[in-house]
Image (cartoon, helix red, strand yellow):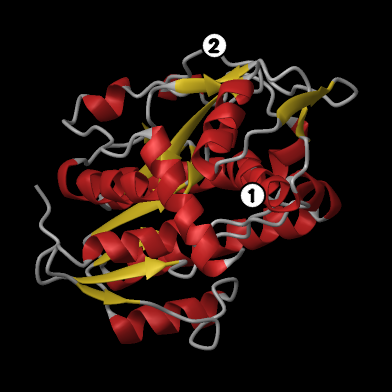
Amino acid sequence: MYSLSGKKVWVAGHRGMVGSAIVRRLASEGAEVVTASRADADLRDQAATTAWIEKTKPDAVFLAAAKVGGILANDTYPADFLFDNLMIEANIIHGAHKVGVEKLMFLGSSCIYPKFAAQPITEDALLTGALEPTNEWYAIAKIAGIKLCDAYRKQHGSDFISGMPTNLYGPGDNFDLNSSHVMPALIRKAHEAKLTGAKSITVWGTGTPRREFLHVDDCADACVHLMKTHSEAGHVNIGSGEDITILDLTQLVCKVVGYEGEIVHDLSKPDGTPRKLMSAAKLRATGWAPKIGLEEGVATVYQWFLANKA
């Protein structure tokens, strides 16, 4: 067991959806949470990052900082996504080692897995096949982060671990229809259709693909749990272990929002991967399980959307 009580804990990426959820979760751990703004340190700059870590001297680090974006952004700025994410993780991991940080957790993404991995995807599927081309730059950087943690563990005995979250949703999500993921996009579509009295909303493809979702507060709880209980090479999937069709998800969102119009399928648009579900067996074996059901989670996020975005 690694206790966070009384420890100085740096949440790198505290302004993002995951980082801010980890900050909220740490409030009950008796830890001193520290954060770095862009004015404090450009995490792509090794000297600036190392200087900040040396000055602050955190005991533990949650590495949730990353350059993120959708398919269009990944395809348009591949060099930025690969370089920025490589630099951020390398600078923080090396700086943490240099200063003697007791424990570090690196957070990745389910996009690290091969495009056609067997379902549900177990951790050992990593590097067994080709990646999804639309986000391979981001995925390669995240794979490098996992391996960097393993390398520092192997060479220096550093207690660095990695967690790979599934599709997350929650307060602080991106609701821009041009760049958002499926959950916030559906919430906004259904809300706007309800406001305008639209007779229908349109869903891409057949609606049959299955996707897994986890509330970001459950993700943060799993991260803290792993930080306290887990210490070994490799990575751990962080997911709900359950999936849902896009059509059923759309119907659920419409129910929560109170939109009663028709759901229309645009069959000229692609379905994408038929199924993407990560195995939750390794995480469940540590004694952790999610607490927030999908309908409850969507309802809380819709309330947040109404209060902050609508």
Q: Which of marks 2 and 1 is nearer the N terminus?
A: 2
Q: How many marks?
A: 2
Q: Is residue 44 left or right of residue 155?
A: right
Rendered residue at 44%/20% (across/down): 124
Rendered residue at 71%/40% (across/down): 135
Q: Which residue lies furthest to the front in this view?
A: 197
Estimate the x, y position of residue 285 in percent, counting from the top left. 20, 24
Estimate the x, y position of residue 226 in percent, counting from the top left. 24, 44
Q: Is residue 61 left or right of residue 169?
A: left
Question: How far apart, in angstroms, are the residues tagged by discs 2 and 1?
Answer: 36 Å
Report the residue marked by disc 2.
Answer: 118
Q: Residue 267 carries which label?
A: none
Q: Quadrant of the C terminus?
A: bottom right
Q: What element carries label 1?
A: helix
Residue 34 can be seen, yes or no: yes
What amino acid type is highlighted by mark number 2? Ala
Q: In this view, does 226 lie above or below 269?
A: below
Q: In this view, does 108 lie to the left or right of 87?
A: left
In-front residue for pair 250/137: 250
What amino acid type is highlighted by mark number 1? His
Q: Quadrant of residue 225?
A: top left
Estimate the x, y position of residue 228 in percent, counting from the top left. 16, 49
In-front residue for pair 70/47: 70
Report the residue marked by disc 1.
Answer: 191
Q: In this view, does 149 lie above or below 284?
A: below
Rendered residue at 27%/48% (across/down): 221
Query: Looking at the image, is mark 2 or mark 1 nearer the viewer?
Result: 1
- Label 2: few (<14), some (14–19) or many (≥20) C-alpha neighbours in 10 Å: some
Q: In this view, does 115 lie above or below 174?
A: above
